[in-house]
Image: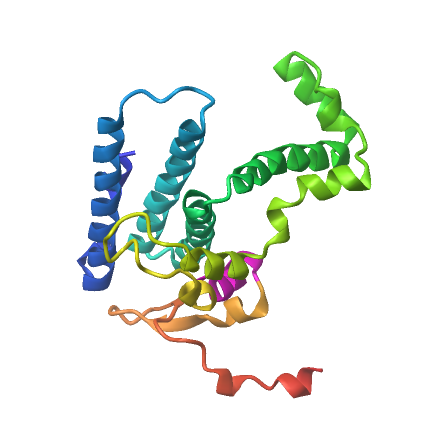
């Protein structure tokens, strides 16, 4: 992934973006340093699960930096929303003293796969089986009881805002300012606002406005401020 960051865009000259990229890289360099000092991790262990989660997190971080520095702002905002959710859920798991939370997380995988497979077109399932070899296990295709479904959905029963609030109540795992930073305070600023971009709703479209370029041409792009809500007439559209 180091090669990816050699292709950051021209917006790295802007101080806020440059500071963000530098901070993100220092965080990941610290993680990589400690990870290499840890030693061998057993395949299938909980620590192996966390390493794979961190891999996805680092990929998302790299993608945010690439999109932000190339002014692909909607994509960067959408990914930042995803990265916030990853941070909340990962931090909830590693800080939570209740080991049953990991079991809920593990069970959710089976429920998700069962839900997806049973809704797929049979032709798609057949092609997948032909490509992968062995047929799907019975638990992936059978109809589940109400009790089984409830058990498999326990992980998703807690909404993200509540999870962030409860996560902040746990003691930090290290004595550093970053570890003591709360996540719930960013729920609306990041997750709620940037979910508009992910969902492609009307609010996100209003963020896009024409802007004058130095050469006199005009381009559509996202502004640096909130859209002017005074231009909306919501009651007239109801």
Q: In which quarter of the image is the N terminus?
A: top left
Q: Where is residue 86 in the image (x, y as percent from the top left)?
A: 45, 48
Q: Nearer the viewer, residue 113 or 164?
A: 164
Q: Where is residue 76 in the image (x, y as percent from the top left)?
A: 39, 54
Could you tell me which residue is drawn at 73 percent across and 25 percent down? 139
Q: How many marks?
A: 0
Residue, far top: 133
Q: Position of residue 67 (x, y in %)?
A: 35, 51
Q: In this view, does 224 lie above or below 66?
A: below
> In this image, 109 relative to 214: left or right?
right
> In this image, 205 relative to 62: left or right?
right
Q: In this view, does 158 lie above or below 210?
A: above
> In this image, 19 relative to 231: left or right?
left
Q: Does the magenta stretch include residue 183?
A: no
Q: Position of residue 75 (x, y in %)?
A: 43, 53
| Magenta stretch bounds | 190-200
Q: In which quarter of the image is the C terminus?
A: bottom right
Residue, far front: 97
Q: Nearer the viewer, residue 124 or 171?
A: 171
> In this image, 140 relative to 13: left or right?
right
Q: Does the magenta stretch include residue 197?
A: yes
Q: Is the magenta stretch mostly helix, strand or loop?
A: helix
Q: In this view, does 117 lie above or below 127?
A: below
Q: In this view, does 153 lie above or below 189?
A: above
Instruction: Check the image and tell me how it is coloured.
Output: rainbow
Which corner quadrant of the image does residue 2 belong to? top left
Which corner quadrant of the image does residue 176 belong to? bottom left
Could you tell me which residue is drawn at 34 percent across and 46 percent down? 61
Could you tell me which residue is drawn at 58 percent across and 69 percent down? 202
């Amino acid at each position: 992934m180091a090669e990816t960051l050699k292709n950051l865009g021209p917006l790295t000259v802007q101080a806020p973006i440059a500071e963000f990229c530098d901070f993100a890289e220092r965080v990941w360099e610290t993680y990589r340093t400690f990870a290499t000092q840890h030693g061998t991790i057993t395949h299938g262990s909980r620590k192996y699960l966390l390493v794979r989660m961190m891999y996805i997190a680092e990929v998302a971080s790299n993608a945010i930096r690439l999109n932000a520095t190339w002014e692909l702002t909607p994509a960067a905002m959408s990914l930042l929303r995803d990265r916030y959710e990853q941070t909340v859920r990962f931090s909830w798991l590693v800080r939570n003293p209740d080991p049953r939370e990991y079991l809920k997380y593990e069970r959710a995988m089976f429920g998700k796969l069962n839900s997806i497979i049973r809704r797929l077109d049979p032709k798609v399932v057949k092609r997948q089986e032909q490509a992968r070899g062995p047929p799907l296990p019975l638990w992936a295709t059978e109809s589940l009881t109400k009790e089984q479904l409830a058990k498999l959905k326990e992980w998703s029963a807690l909404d993200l805002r509540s999870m962030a609030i409860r996560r902040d109540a746990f003691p930090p795992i290290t004595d550093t300012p970053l570890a003591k930073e709360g996540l719930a305070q960013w729920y609306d600023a990041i997750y709620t606002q940037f979910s508009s971009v992910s969902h492609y709703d009307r609010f996100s479209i209003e963020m896009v406005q024409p802007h004058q370029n130095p050469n006199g041409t005009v381009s559509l792009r996202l502004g640096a401020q909130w859209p002017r809500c005074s231009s909306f007439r919501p009651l007239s559209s109801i």
